Image: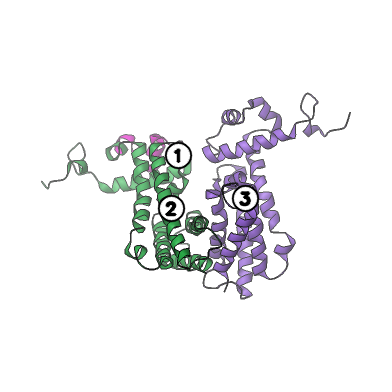
Chain colours: A green, B purple
Amino acid sequence: MVSVPRSRMLPSGKPRPRYDQESVLAVAAEVFTERGYDGTSMEHLSRASGLSKSSIYHHVEGKEQLLRLALERALDPLLASLDADDVTTGRAVDRLQHLVRRDVEILADRLPYVTLLLRVHGNTKTERWALDQRRRFDRAVARLVQEAIDEGDVRSDVDARTTAHLMFGIVNSIIEWYRPGRDSSPAALADQITSMVLDGIRT
Amino acid sequence: MVSVPRSRMLPSGKPRPRYDQESVLAVAAEVFTERGYDGTSMEHLSRASGLSKSSIYHHVEGKEQLLRLALERALDPLLASLDADDVTTGRAVDRLQHLVRRDVEILADRLPYVTLLLRVHGNTKTERWALDQRRRFDRAVARLVQEAIDEGDVRSDVDARTTAHLMFGIVNSIIEWYRPGRDSSPAALADQITSMVLDGIRT
């Protein structure tokens, strides 16, 4: 028998089917967004996923862990995008451009998870953690905009914080209207948004 | 005795205090946004407003009428903005500019009601009516963008529908971060957004 780490085994000793956690997470993200986290019970998740509650508990400890895992699907790549090579070296305006492009692609790729992230309230520890991470991200973008203003590449008639909010207002609007398949490809969307945002903020 | 229309009189015969309907509406918009319309009961509205349920019923027939009245606070001025003189005559790009400016001011002025409008699902007749009105608005903006493209003033490398979504992505982002008093005045905000949006879409 091939050795499988304990956490990847079911109580029966069979390997845990990993695709199930992914599909439970995808369903959970949509149900949390639709009903609100507070308004969602394990019963709702069971009905929406077609899995019994005990099957869901094989994969996660409970509702709050599901929320955390779903939010990480959005936050992990977004926070990692701040540390990418082309976002950490070069002129600030170019770093901003790379950041916008990456983030448009992340949003298009992880639509249900980013939608959940942008709809989170702050009633539980996990939700407050997610809001903290969002604020960390927003502050990093505002610092980058400020550097680009200081380097003379971004207009200085709007303060850096407002510019950062407006730039990501465009990026985040994707969750409201973008439907993969119906609209432009993620790469074309990234081109359109990046050039529109950058033209709007350059000096 | 001065004649007062029946609908503005309480069962006691006294004139209905109109400020109460306004304050019930303001509370209802916030509670509907916070809890979701489905998750809100008259009991929640009573607790949040400090009015008894029977006091609330003096002013409105029920929860769905409250939702409709609250949504009209956002939709009436937004739809009216499409018919303003400076939005219906002149070059399309200038009409777009006037429309963005007006709508930023409406959003800043009616923040809780527009937030509710942008969060509405589609579970009830009133919500579906609101979504229809939003689509009517979106289509009118997309037509205006198309005219501006045809007149050569707006870039043609992005289709009109996507440009309209992205423009109003910026405008609608106001509900996520704008706090009157803390941030720029509505007029300054309108200046900033209008010039950023227009610089981003002009040829």
Residue type pointed to by label 2: Arg
- Are the residues flagged by discs 1 and 3 in contact, CB closer than 8 Å? no
Mark 1 to mark 3 CA distance (whole Å): 23 Å
Tell me if A139 is positioned left or right of B86 in this view: left
Q: From where the camera sits, is residue A111 visible?
A: no
Q: Are marks 3 and 2 on the same chain?
A: no
Residue behind mark 3: B108
What span is colored magenta in the figure? A37-55
Residue at left offset 76%, top offset 31%: B16
Q: Earlier in the sequence, mark 1 or mark 2?
A: 1
Residue type pointed to by label 1: Gly
Of residues A26 and B101, the one nearer the viewer is B101
Residue type pointed to by label 3: Ala
Residue at left offset 30%, top offset 39%: A60
Relative image position of residue B91 (x, y in whole percent) = 68, 71
Mark 3 to mark 2 CA distance (whole Å): 23 Å
Closer to us: mark 1 or mark 2? 2
Residue A122's mark?
1
Closer to us: mark 3 or mark 2? 2
Residue behind mark 2: A139
